Amino acid sequence: YSAEAVIEAVRQSTVAAQIAGRIVELRFDVGDYVKKGEVIVRIDERAADQAVAASAAQVQEAQAALANARAQFERSKQLAAQKFISQAGLDRAETDYKAAQARVSALVAGAGQASTERSFATIVAPYSGVVSARHVEVGEMAVPGKPLLTGFDPSSLRVVANLPQAQVPAIQAVNRAWVEIPTLDRRIEVKQMIVGPAADPRTHTTRVRLDLPVDVRGLYPGVFARA
């Protein structure tokens, strides 16, 4: 049985911004090969730096207030032991001390979040691959969720075909397939065949994925194939 099919990447993704800011550097363009961990986009991080500095200052202020509340609480315990202040006064000093502790914890967490957000200004490749689309230019504003670059891993490709339901049992029984690539004039035996567990109720077809050998030269997503 022969079915029309198309090449797709097993790993294909679009990298998006996680913070707002002006794009100051785009290191790669369409067709460039990128290694995992390489910096692909930089966003102006000056606003994020200011947020980190403000958070650090707030933490220092809260820590100073905590030290003062702790000292006041210790003095109140001594005075309460000597019956110079009431139990209510001691309870109030203890409440102030615990509130200062809670404020420091909250501000430390906020400072950590600000530092994490600053790291989002430098965007790295999640895996090695080829850039297939660029969605922005240097100087444009990035906002959270805005697509920046799309890429795929050329070493991990597969063929996808939709088969009539009547053909599925026989294909599953044989569990072998070949792929013809007209543009390359090649015939490749697939590495693995996965038949979808469900059928499309509109077309009454079942989706079949055919994994190709690693590093088949000349192939990229969207190429027509015949399974």
Image (tube, helix red, strand yellow):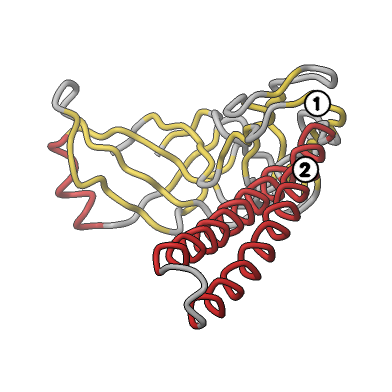
Q: Quadrant location of residue 142?
A: top right
Q: Position of residue 82 (x, y in %)?
A: 51, 82
Q: Quadrant location of residue 214?
A: bottom right
For the N terminus, the image quarter is top left
- Amino acid under label 2? Thr
Q: Nearer the viewer, residue 2 or 55?
A: 55
Placement of 31 over or under 156, stated as above or below: above
- Residue at coordinates 62% horizontally, 41% vertically from top-left? 152
Disc number placed over residue 23 in the picture, else none? 1
- Amino acid under label 1? Ile
Q: Nearer the viewer, residue 124 or 186?
A: 124
Query: Which residue in the structure is indicated by mark 2?
Result: 122
- Helix, strand or loop at label 2? It is strand
Q: How many marks do you count on the picture?
A: 2
Placement of 221 over or under 157, stated as above or below: above
What separation in Å lies between label 2 and label 1 (alpha carbons)? 10 Å
Q: Nearer the viewer, residue 64 or 140?
A: 64
Q: Position of residue 169 (x, y in %)?
A: 14, 49
Placement of 37 over or under 75, stated as above or below: above
- Residue at coordinates 69% horizontally, 60% vertically from top-left? 63
Please rate how many residues cluster around mark 2, counting C-alpha atoms within 10 Å: few if below 14, some from 14 to 19, many from 20.
some
Q: Position of residue 133 (x, y in %)?
A: 68, 26
